[in-house]
Image (cartoon, grey):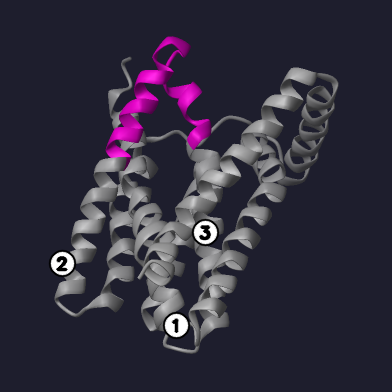
């Protein structure tokens, strides 16, 4: 593994984006939203679920086509940067929302989560390029490990700001954390292959997506695996995004 700099920067991106996953998506902002932004916890709970569901559905529908465009037009790093910046800016703007601004907050959460989940599509696609097959599990594990470290550090920083009475500064902190530690990835990772024009790349991506769907439908094992993983992952995500709300509102 000669490209150690690229591997480290790839792992650091997981360290960076875990600040969003832990503080915004899972632990602190959901409770702040239902108790500090929404007029009522039940209303906040409803709109939080809508925001996450809408953003995830959008990414699920558009990712195959955007991914094909990025791969075939050589725009993978550009798309990773675009989605990351979308998340970073949206999270930073959360510092300006106030109680009662539920629709504005939902819009920012949708944009932030689209940015986060969309960026992961391109981030994950780098792994096969960076390391041979036999090392992918190890490098992926390094990324996960650094991701958990990033989550812990971001939560500690958020706790410090909460104790200082600066709750609204938590969101810009996450934005800055995400951006700074993702910079090595943008500086060292390759732009991706492919030299097609955007129009041809999009059509090629569409054909590849249709071909993959036909292959999945023709293979029972692939269908069952993806269907099972869908329900499993949906359950896990539901627990993650609602656990802090449940603990704070229901269990008090």
Question: How many C-alpha atoms fall within 10 Å of the one at disc 2: few (<14), some, or many (≥20)?
Answer: some
Q: Which residues are magenta?
A: 124-147
Q: Could one spot residue 78 in this view of the protein?
A: no
Q: Decide whether the magenta segment is chiefly helix, strand or loop.
A: helix
Whether pointer 2 and pointer 3 mark residues with C-beta atoms closer than 8 Å, the reply is: no
From the image, tell me which residue sits under label 2.
Answer: 160
Residue position marked by numbered label 1 in the rendering = 37
Task: Let me know if residue 128 is in the magenta part.
Answer: yes
Residue farthest to the top, as pictured: 134
Which residue does the image show at 19% across and 80% down from the upper left? 165
The residue positioned 69% from the left and 37% from the top of the image is 68
Where, quadrant-wise, is the C terminus in this rendering? bottom left
User: Which residue has dot 3 on it?
Assistant: 113
Find residue 168 and report its horizontal and vertical position in percent. Answer: 30, 78
Q: Position of residue 180 (x, y in %)?
A: 28, 54
Quadrant of the frame with the N terminus: top left
Local crowd at mark 1 within 10 Å, few (<14), some, or many (≥20)?
Answer: many
How far apart marks 3 and 1 lie (CA) works out to 18 Å
- Which residue is nearer to you in this view: 123 or 56? 56
Mark 3 or 1: in front is 1
What whole-number distance in Å separates the C-alpha atoms at marks 2 and 3? 25 Å
Q: Is residue 46 above or below residue 37?
A: above
Height in image: 248 above or below 66?
A: below
Q: Residue 244, image x and y in percent?
A: 39, 61
């Amino acid at each position: 593994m000669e490209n150690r700099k690229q591997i480290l920067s790839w792992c650091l991106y997981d360290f960076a984006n875990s600040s969003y996953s832990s503080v915004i998506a899972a632990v602190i902002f959901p409770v702040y939203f239902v108790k500090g932004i929404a007029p009522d916890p039940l209303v906040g709970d409803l709109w939080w679920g809508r925001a996450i569901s809408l953003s995830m559905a959008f990414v699920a529908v558009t990712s195959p086509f955007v991914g094909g465009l990025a791969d075939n037009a050589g725009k993978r790093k550009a798309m990773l940067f675009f989605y990351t910046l979308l998340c970073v800016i949206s999270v930073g703007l959360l510092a300006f929302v106030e109680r009662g601004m539920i629709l504005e907050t939902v819009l920012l959460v949708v944009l932030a989560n689209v940015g986060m989940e969309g960026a992961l599509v391109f981030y994950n696609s780098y792994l096969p390029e960076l390391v041979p097959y036999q090392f992918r599990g190890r490098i992926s594990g390094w990324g996960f490990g650094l991701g958990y470290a990033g989550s812990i550090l971001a939560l500690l920083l958020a706790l410090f700001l909460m104790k200082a009475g600066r709750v609204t500064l938590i969101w810009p902190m996450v934005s800055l954390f995400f951006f700074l530690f993702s910079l090595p990835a943008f500086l060292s990772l390759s732009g991706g292959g492919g030299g097609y024009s955007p129009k041809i790349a999009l059509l090629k991506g569409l054909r590849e997506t249709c071909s993959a769907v036909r292959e999945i439908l023709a293979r029972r094992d692939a269908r069952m695996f993806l269907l099972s993983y869908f329900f499993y992952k949906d359950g896990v995500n539901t627990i993650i995004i609602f656990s802090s709300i449940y603990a704070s509102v229901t269990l008090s």
